[in-house]
Amino acid sequence: MKKRLLAGLAALVMAASTGCADSESSSESASSEQAAAESSPESESSGNVGNVKGLSMSVNSSDGKMSITRADDKSTPMGDPDTWTIFVYLCGTDLESRYGSATDDVKQMIGAQASDNVRFVVQTGGTKDWSNEYFGDEKAERWVVQNNNMELVESTDNTNMGSSDNLADFLKWGVSEYPAAKMGVILWDHGGGSISGACVDELNEDDSLSLQEINTAFSDVYQDMTDKFEFIGFDCCLMGTVETANILASYARYFYGSQETEPGSGWDYATCGTYLAEHPGADGAELGKVVSDSFYDECGLIDREKDCTLSVIDLSKFDEFTVAFNDFSKELFDSAGSSLSGIVRGIGKADNFGGNNKSVGYTNMVDIGGIIKQCSSCADGTAALEALENCVIYNKNGSAHSGASGLSTYYPLKIEDSSDLKVFSGITISPYYLSIIDMIAKGYSEDGYSNSGIFDSEGSWEYGGSDEDSGYFDYADDLDTKSDLITFEQEPTLSDNGVYSFKLDENGLNNTAGASAYIYMMLDEETIVELGETYDVNTDWESGEVADNFDGLWLALPNGKLLAIYIAGGDSEHYVYTSPILLNGQRTNLRIVRDSEGISLEGIWDGIDENGMAAREVTKLKEGDKIAPIYYLINSDNDDVNEETAEEYVWEEDSDLMYAYLPASNYFYGFNIEDAYGRTVTTEPVIFTIDDDGKITFSDPNDGADEANEADEDNEEDEEE
């Protein structure tokens, strides 16, 4: 029975471990030697360049050099000197209907210092219920906020806030009716990063704005403008990405965005409005610093400053980074044939944002500066890092992301199917970086890898060439998750002193990207409960030796009830964990931080929803809250995996999580070993037994297996007789 249980466990763990006019005008092409895209003399332009509005990027595989063409760089102010209009696309969603967060931010706008030179122009929509008596639930409305007052200037039936046309219509109207010397745009709502976009309309089947739709909207608006927007910002989670910046560089001077999730309270509009009232001549760089600093302070009021990130990007310098990153990516791709596992291990050490585990979901947003730094042994990233630092002119990071570079990019920490790859293929800033992603996703082949599918028949790549119709990435819908590349000099073995370890041979070491451990507790002869995962293993990537480092302690509620724990991100100095629970009967997650100060419970976080959008609110537990841990249970007889909810614990005011010794039972401990292509090998677990006195003994389940099988067979024969 035990052997059958172990076989079922190994198979199921494997499965669980595996998202202004008519003419066109172009600027000078950017090459590696130029290091940037130059603009042609200002002229009337439709804003349409190449096969994507506002932007053309191309690379020829013969030399690998990037060429960039953008719509005209306009610079004629549209309003009186020292005036500001900030357009706020206020898509309320559940942030408003559940928490009233949008209403709170509008109150801040009203409370800013009065000024005839500064106004907020607000488009409302996207929520089932507004938490104020002014906004109509059944209407899409436009309000002007100025001089401590709010005036309704337009009202129509609700429109789809996830529509590109709706965004464009609001901004065209706003630029025409409320022009200013400097104009900014803020998209306010949920965000999911480069793949999922932003602004989910809960009245229209959760439709949202993709990056391509955002690009289309701004291109349509830009053709009626004589000046660029001073800034475009996202008061949303996870939108501080290179793919977002690349689109906005055609239409704005500065970009504000957060790499990490944001709390629902968002930016501090009172401080920002007051700053502009006192400094109406400020530019986007100066305002961006105020936005970032005041956002950090706002996060501090709710104890969220550790996770805070907000960046100010000088978009006039972004093309220089794009060119340098493409050069870096080409060199990295050229080296990948012999060093892919080192590349993947390096990227695994880079900071990532928004969760990224099976408990809360995956955003697959990774710090691009971290990618470049961690892969520096495989390609020279000096120029790319310098260009990145030049365009990220300010970023405010909390201690959890102290090394974040200011911009993220997509990297498949988890590939669910082809959908994310198809979206990314249309927004990536380098065909060579896309080639590395493609190589990893496809997996190892004895015939090697060719990136010819990324380029056309003539060896050219153009930005915006999505795979939606070609089906190139359809292979990701049916991936084999088991690796054949992990090979051992010493097979996973339990030593006489109870240490479980293995040693990779040269081939295995060259192909291995990382190792983690899994822990399960046996409930009875047929049922196992998953306690979760841990990176608390001793690894030596020089020798290939990996050994357990488990101490028998596990995170638990104050009453000692164990939690199922999953690592959401971090490094050796700072880890974020999540644990699935029912809170007062509703499914959510505990969000837990481990750093040099110990373990702290940040609060409750819903994670990533089915649209790829990250929850913004991390709410504190209140006295009387009822917490019921959720576990995954495996039945070895039929391979079913089910959820089980434990008994409720009632939270008390001074409660805190604890490390508890595991209770008396049998436990399984094994390794998940991941290769460079995201495939895994799951080792057969060893058993450790904790008795009623807390004594721990280890055993290899295969010891005596033959005798056990013979005994089982004899018993079966007796039963038949």
Image (tube, rainbow, N blue to C red):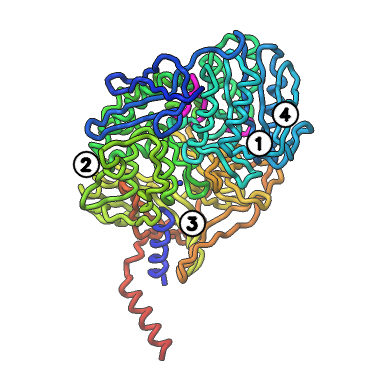
Reading the image, the residue beneath label 1 is 92
Please state if 667 lies on the left or on the right of 98 as rendered: left
Specify the quadrant of the image occupied by residue 78: top right
- Residue type beneath disc 4: Glu
Separation of residues labelled 2 and 3 (CA atoms): 37 Å
User: Is residue 155 depicted above or below 498 in this figure?
Assistant: above
Residue drawn at x 55%, y 48% as measured from the top left: 610
Please provide the residue range marked out in magenta. 245-265
Residue drawn at (51%, 64%), measured in percent from left and top?
523
Question: Measured from the top left, where is residue 664 in percent x and y?
Answer: 50, 59
> In this figure, which residue is indicated by the disc labeled 3?
530
Q: Dividing the image into 4 quarters, which one contains the N terminus?
A: bottom left
Q: Earlier in the sequence, mark 2 or mark 3?
A: 2
Mark 4 vs mark 3: which is more N-terminal? Answer: 4
From the image, state whether disc 1 or disc 2 is nearer to you: 1
The amino acid beneath tag 3 is Glu
Q: Nearer the viewer, residue 517 or 336?
A: 336
| Position of residue 8 measured from the top left corner of the image (x, y, whole percent) | 41, 66
Q: Badge 2 is on which residue? A: 338
